[in-house]
């Protein structure tokens, strides 16, 4: 029988600038307001696909855990060995699972490091590594803007004449760099500009999502739902008026209600109680404002422990990135969207050895391939939508990634 691989978790110094610790060896990130997890190096990685991909991911993770001898003096969610995950939107595309060699975590005043192997504790850098960015040139996407507006018009027609209430259509743009694109400077730019989002990186997918699909910690589950968006002007007085108009907009409130209901319905079978606020709040980001609702629940206590994989299977895809009813919406997306989303709009984040974790929806993101990065944005189409306004909204959503490249 093979000997077990040591995994050690221990406390380290005071508050750490997590993104400054990263190096270019397969950087991984899940950071918000300076807290979260970063990792680097690859201990093990695999891909999964198919309708049972969440079950396959759980099986692979549990098999890996069986090979570890864990010494964890910190305890709590995100300590010990951690799996970083980035699932595709479409179950037939590849999802990526990565176990990093080194993980550093920060929560409140507590910091910790986890490393795999019988080596001494890794030495953390005293100053951040310097990373240069090339010059980017933006090109077209999978389809041009006029063709995309035609698809939006078709989606509006489908909503008006069938059993569908909402369908989400996405579009992409490709930017090309003069040198190989590095993840870390993009992460740092996103974190500086959008500190209240979850800044993530897994296997070349990098972004800053405002939407928390799932936080599971000690039997409590939280999901932050965003749907209904308005671009910001940068003028405080105008933006305050726009926020008020967003909170009263029947079109946006309708879109938001579908998204909230889809999440609440997905969580209900697993929870002894759920809390769904009666009305959303307006979430202010640097480039846009969203209607937002935090849905919470307490898991039912049972012998068959519910973990993050179980909840992901039920939650994805939510109405926020697919539509309502989601099976019909998914078919319409497949038929008319005109591009492969890859891991955009899929669950991204981390899961620990106990099955707890934090995963967002991979929005405001881009997929890096050597010197190219493909950036994405999506819009919820309902009966009151207009192609011109949806194009404007998608452009506003792309500002986050576009500005992070400069």
Image: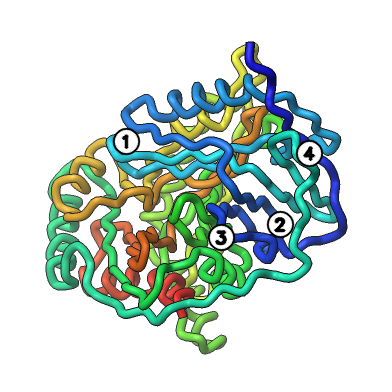
The quarter of the picture where the N terminus appears is top right
Disc 4 + disc 2, Cβ < 8 Å: no
Residue carrying label 4? 9
| 307 vs 285, nearest the viewer | 307
- Which residue is the site of mark 2? 35
| In front: label 4 or label 3 | 3
Which residue is located at x 48 percent, y 61 percent? 207
**Crowding at label 1, few (<14), some or many (≥20) Cα neighbours within 10 Å?**
many
Residue highlighted by disc 1: 91
- The CA span between labels 1 and 4 is 34 Å
Q: Are marks 3 and 2 in contact (CB under 8 Å)?
A: no
CA gap, disc 4 and disc 3: 22 Å
Q: Nearer the viewer, mark 3 or mark 2?
A: 3
Give the SS element for disc 1.
loop
In the image, residue 244 sits, relative to residue 321, either above or below, namely below
Query: Residue 66: where, in percent of width, then height?
Result: 63, 19
Residue 168: % across, % down: 29, 53
Q: Residue at x 42, y 54 (%)?
A: 256
- How far apart are the two marked residues, 1 and 2, measured between alpha carbons? 31 Å
Tag in front: 3 or 1? 3
Name the N-terminal-most of marks 1 and 4: 4
In percent of the image, x 16 and y 70: which residue is there?
144
- Say if residue 265 shows up in the picture: no
For numbered disc 4, what is the local secondary structure? strand
**Which disc, if any, is residue 7?**
none
Q: In the rendered structure, which disc, 3 or 1, sits on the residue that comes first in sequence?
A: 3
In the picture, residue 6 is in which quadrant? top right
Q: Nearer the viewer, residue 243 or 354?
A: 354
Decide which of 135, 1 is in the foreground and name it: 1
């Amino acid at each position: 029988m093979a000997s077990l691989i040591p995994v050690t978790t221990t406390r380290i110094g005071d508050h750490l600038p997590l993104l400054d610790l990263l190096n270019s060896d397969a950087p991984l990130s899940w950071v918000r307001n300076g807290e979260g997890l970063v990792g680097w190096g690859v201990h093990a990685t695999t891909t999964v696909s198919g309708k049972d991909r969440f079950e396959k991911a759980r099986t692979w993770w549990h098999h890996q855990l069986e090979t570890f001898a864990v010494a964890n003096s910190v305890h709590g969610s995100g300590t010990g060995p951690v799996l970083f995950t980035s699932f595709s939107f479409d179950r037939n595309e590849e999802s990526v699972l990565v176990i990093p060699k080194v993980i550093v975590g920060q929560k409140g005043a507590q910091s910790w490091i986890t490393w795999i192997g019988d080596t001494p504790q890794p030495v953390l850098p005293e100053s951040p590594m310097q990373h240069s960015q090339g010059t980017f040139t933006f090109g077209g996407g999978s389809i041009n803007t006029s063709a995309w507006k035609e698809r939006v018009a078709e989606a509006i027609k489908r909503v008006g004449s069938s059993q569908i209430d909402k369908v989400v259509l996405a579009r992409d743009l490709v930017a090309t760099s003069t040198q190989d694109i590095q993840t870390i400077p993009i992460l740092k730019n996103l974190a500086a500009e959008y500190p209240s989002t979850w800044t993530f990186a897994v296997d070349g997918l990098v972004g800053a999502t405002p939407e928390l699909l799932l936080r599971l910690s000690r039997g409590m589950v939280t999901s932050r739902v965003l749907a209904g968006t308005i671009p910001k002007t940068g003028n405080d007085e105008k933006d305050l008026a726009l926020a008020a108009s967003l909170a009263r907009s029947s079109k946006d409130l309708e879109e938001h209600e579908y998204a909230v209901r889809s999440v609440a319905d997905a969580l209900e079978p697993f929870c002894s109680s759920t809390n769904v606020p009666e009305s959303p709040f307006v979430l202010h980001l640097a480039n846009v404002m969203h209607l937002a609702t935090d849905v919470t629940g307490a898991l039912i206590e049972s012998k068959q422990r519910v973990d993050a994989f179980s909840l992901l299977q039920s939650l994805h895809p939510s109405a926020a990135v697919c539509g309502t009813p989601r099976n019909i919406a998914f078919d319409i997306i497949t038929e008319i969207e005109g591009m492969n989303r890859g891991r955009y709009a899929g669950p991204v984040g981390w899961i620990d050895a106990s099955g707890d974790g934090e995963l967002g929806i991979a929005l405001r993101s881009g997929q890096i391939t050597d010197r190219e990065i493909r950036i994405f944005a999506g819009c919820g189409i309902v009966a009151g939508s207009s192609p011109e306004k949806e194009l404007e909204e998608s452009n506003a959503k792309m500002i986050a990634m576009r500005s992070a490249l400069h």
